[in-house]
Image (tube, coloured by chain):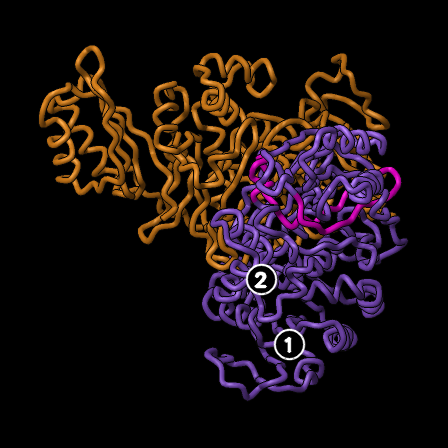
Chain colours: A orange, B purple
Amino acid sequence: MSDYAIGLVGWGTVGGGVLNILQQDGTLLKERCNLNVRLKAIVTRNPDRARDQKPGSAVVGSDLALITDDPEIKTVLHLVGGTTAAKDIAIACLRAGKHVVTANKALLAEHWDELFAVAKETGHTIAFEAAVAGGIPVIAALRDGLVANDIRGIYSILNGTCNYILSRMTQDGMGYDEALGLAKDLGYAESDPTLDVNGTDTAHKLAILAQIAFNTNVPFCAVHIEGIENISADDIESAQRLDSTIKLLGVAKRCPAGVELRVAPTLVPNSNPLAHVNANYNAVRIMANNAGPTLLVGQGAGALPTASAVLSDLIDIAVGSYQRTAEYFRFFAGGEPSTILPEEDEFTASYARFRVKDEPGVLAQMTATLSKHGVSLRAVHQGEPDADSTAEIEVTTHPTRGGAFLSAVKEIDQAGITVQPTVCLRRLDEG
Amino acid sequence: MSDYAIGLVGWGTVGGGVLNILQQDGTLLKERCNLNVRLKAIVTRNPDRARDQKPGSAVVGSDLALITDDPEIKTVLHLVGGTTAAKDIAIACLRAGKHVVTANKALLAEHWDELFAVAKETGHTIAFEAAVAGGIPVIAALRDGLVANDIRGIYSILNGTCNYILSRMTQDGMGYDEALGLAKDLGYAESDPTLDVNGTDTAHKLAILAQIAFNTNVPFCAVHIEGIENISADDIESAQRLDSTIKLLGVAKRCPAGVELRVAPTLVPNSNPLAHVNANYNAVRIMANNAGPTLLVGQGAGALPTASAVLSDLIDIAVGSYQRTAEYFRFFAGGEPSTILPEEDEFTASYARFRVKDEPGVLAQMTATLSKHGVSLRAVHQGEPDADSTAEIEVTTHPTRGGAFLSAVKEIDQAGITVQPTVCLRRLDEG
């Protein structure tokens, strides 16, 4: 039985989850992999805060030196949010000769090069399974399990808050605000959910996945991001009519001209398994040239699922396995940034909902405009006219260059055919 | 760039897949993990057989010494079937100082202790991601990704042949023989599909998963195995009426008194994601105490998906990572066999379809018998009587001790209430 001393920075939700697992399942780790994981020190901004948990034999304080000055501590569980102090802490731990396990996706997505440069310089490493999709071991699956595959695309649901809100809207007919309120009540949404609902959190995770999948440097600022704040009950109903479900999808796709990277609410056809991943679950669908499509579904957030991933990284480091991976795999080093296609060059299927005057020739004029721009329609649905003599026309397209579709819609709106701004969404077509 | 020399034993479907990937995606491996994987020798029983593939720079022969005598070869891809010669080959490679990567689930399930004892003695290791669920990286997910979890249960679809047959029967109303014929035509079933359809193949894979999940020695002979050979169109229709889908499930469940391990055709409620895994796909649903339920879905067989898993093991060994894992993790060593519960002590939900005389009091007598044996009914459905004055009664039960349910059904059949032997199936109730 080897003794392995660790430190913990950050005693919040995930840090508490780690403590829980170590206290409840520490014996299991001993039995399974002959390791006695010993938490020696907890560093937190509020060491004196009243807590439900006991720190066990760990010393608790606010000074990082409790960890950095302790030569016995080999790995630091870095469970703090933000990207400023969090970066300094991670770098200080590396420089003090510790490995770092982090769940901080924003930190990684925004400061990858700097962090891994320090890691390389110090001969220590950063593990981050918990940063993407919580308890689902997707980083390892993509990096190791699918290592012998050209990854063609990743289609993912990476934010449990958004998936919960959209699921309630779809399954129970709730409005956005009501569903968000419920998500807050249940602890699925933070009091300020901005970075979740606006797509930023998904984009952070997507950038990390893309970096591994495409073995390339992904500049986070190049990810196109749309959130779910404007999704209405009408959108949800319309998607249902089209046998689809709206999901906030993170999509990373390799194309001949570069990489498509976007986060956007997307109509997912119900024939696709992602359409059925509901509540606060996360899912990652990986299109791999040899293994075929591979789907992973699980709890993407929460104290215990995230802590489960943190501890899987810790064991990987404690047995000495992760260091070997980090030494060989090139994506750790960043490298040349890949070409991220601008939105107008993306090749995606789309959905639009037009509100038009109920007049002869309107549909003909609309479809002529779409056709002129090279947009190939997949399905068209025109509803009965309403009392105000307007009607709704829903269209879905085959994959089309994004610019062409947006130009066509703009032209239709400007021609006065529509009586309100047209709603455009992506439609998933793995084609 | 490190050069890494390997040997291949067995140039069949999977061996051919490995050759394909190395030839087509070798550059990708170089770029991704700085390894130049060089196939030096191929050993096959039929070196002179005409093949579509070229061996590249590898020498081809029938003598294992081509590999065992070559000190440059560090790892052997062991892609041969059977459990006799296959075992000798694996042991000879270990004794010659090579690591072994195998896709042979029967060999592992039936000779685990002997193989890993030799591995330990020689200081070399055996990797087997490809042995279970082909391209899905489930071994790594269970072993590493979920290392910090008490695994409560595994519910799995591990045989693509069976899943394809059952899917065709369910979706297209085919009979068993027709669906099996189609599976053969499409290459999803072998010319002799016995070990697939009778559940043995699933049981081999399940035993391996259970060994890792429960960190224990699973005697393969203790797995209860039922196949799909007797599943009829009536069973399929009945399941559909009950909003369920019949799947050949491999179930491993930890109970206070021991481990439940069985392979059986099972009614899966359509609310469970496993019900929707169709065609030749495999799926593994893992109930983990901290990470929560985690589902992995993908291609469980075929040349390229299996080869993808073989090469993931190879890279894991080539970078030196897998050896560290094997050194620490206790399940590699086998150990004390776990208590496998006898079938009558399993605690499972069930389904039965009775064909009874259409007489007053029959349902009352039946339900009284079930109740007397402590069987708690979940739902009962009695159809209209047929022209021959018999009627069908379908029941589903809450989880009950298996022995109680089977005794009750036996008593009902013996009491002359039923006019033909009652059909009993498991019903998935994750509890």
Quick one: A106 or B143, which is closer to the camera? B143
The magenta span reads B237-266
User: Decide: marks 2, 1 in contact (CB < 8 A)?
Assistant: no
| Label 1: chain letter | B
Name the residue at 48% across, 46% down.
Answer: A211
Local crowd size for mark 2, using a 10 Å CA cut-off: few (<14), some (14–19), many (≥20): many
For image coordinates 60% across by 34% down, the residue present is B383
* First along the sequence among labels 2 and 1: 1
The x and y percentages for residue A84 are 54, 27
- In the rendered structure, which amino acid carries the disc numbered 1? Val
Image location (x, y in percent) of residue B115: 80, 67
Residue B9 numbered mark, or none: 1
Subunit ID for the residue under disc 2: B
Q: Which residue is mark 2?
A: B306
Question: Taking A409 as reference, is B34 above or below it?
Answer: below
As measured in the structure, the alpha-carbon distance from the residue carrying label 2 to the one carrying label 1 is 15 Å
- In the image as oriented, which residue stretches furthest toward the bottom? B48
Foreground of the two, A283 or B386:
B386
* Quadrant that contains the N terminus of chain B: bottom right
- Residue B245 on the magenta segment: yes
Vertical position of residue B431 compared to residue B253: above or below: above
- Say if A107 sits above or below B280 in the image: above
